Amino acid sequence: MKVLETERLRLRWLTLADAPFLLALMNEPAFIQNVADRGLRTPEDAARYIAEKMLPSYEENGFGPNVVELKNAGDPIGTCGLYQRPAMEEVDIGYAFLHPYWGRGYAREAAAAVLHHGREVLRIPKIVALTAPTNESSIRLLEKLGLRYERMIQLEGYASESKLFA
């Protein structure tokens, strides 16, 4: 289901057919270093992850992670969306892009659209963001989006604390 469109991008919900793309994205070294190693090693692992972790969010919350595609080519280049984590009261925005698409403004374009949609259409009162303390590019992006560092937080399933921006 298409969720958003920007000048250069189309954002839509993930489907099981996105498993090969998600497998590649979640096994990039930067994803493992800055987010987590989700242990996805096969397309079947990725399909199971989509079915168990992502599809239920659309049903329960009306939002979740979106595939970010180039509008002109349809190629998936990353994910960007809203997450309702069981251990958190607030909704948080998350994004990850394949390395060849870094530095082109795609993350900022997608994240700005998702934040606007979350606030204006879904009427979510407070959207936060989490990032690894060493992920300087993500920190700069969050600051450009108007979010400010608030505190450190330890999430279950993560080896180290994350910076929370609000």
Image: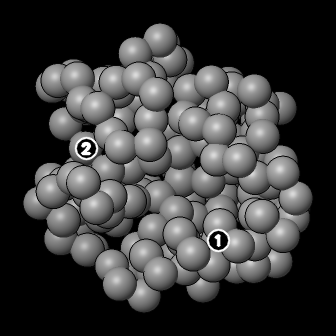
Residue 44: image quadrant is bottom right
Q: Residue at x 64, y 47 (%)?
A: 38
Looking at the picture, how far across and down is residue 13, in whole percent?
A: 59, 75
Q: Residue at x 24, y 54 (%)?
A: 87
Looking at the picture, how far across and down is residue 138, in whole percent?
A: 48, 25
Element on which disc 1 rests = helix
Residue behind mark 1: 50
Looking at the picture, how far across and down is residue 50, in whole percent?
A: 64, 71
Circle 2 residues within 10 Å: few <14, some 14–19, many ≥20: many
Q: Relative to 122, is 23 on the left or the right?
A: right
Label 2 or label 1, whichever lies nearer to me, is 1
- The quarter in which the N terminus is drawn is bottom right
- The quarter in which the C terminus is drawn is top left
In the foreground, 1 or 45: 45
Q: Is residue 151 above or below residue 97?
A: above
Q: Relative to 161, is 14 on the left or the right?
A: right
Q: Amino acid at mark 1?
A: Ile
Q: Is residue 160 above or below residue 81?
A: above
Question: In the rendered image, is residue 15 in sight?
Answer: yes
In the foreground, 69 or 139: 139
Q: Residue at x 41, y 29 (%)?
A: 131
Element on which disc 2 rests = strand
Question: In the rendered image, is residue 4 in sight?
Answer: no
Q: Amino acid at mark 2?
A: Val
Upstream in sequence: badge 2 or badge 1: 1
Q: Relative to 91, is 40 on the left or the right?
A: right
Residue behind mark 2: 128
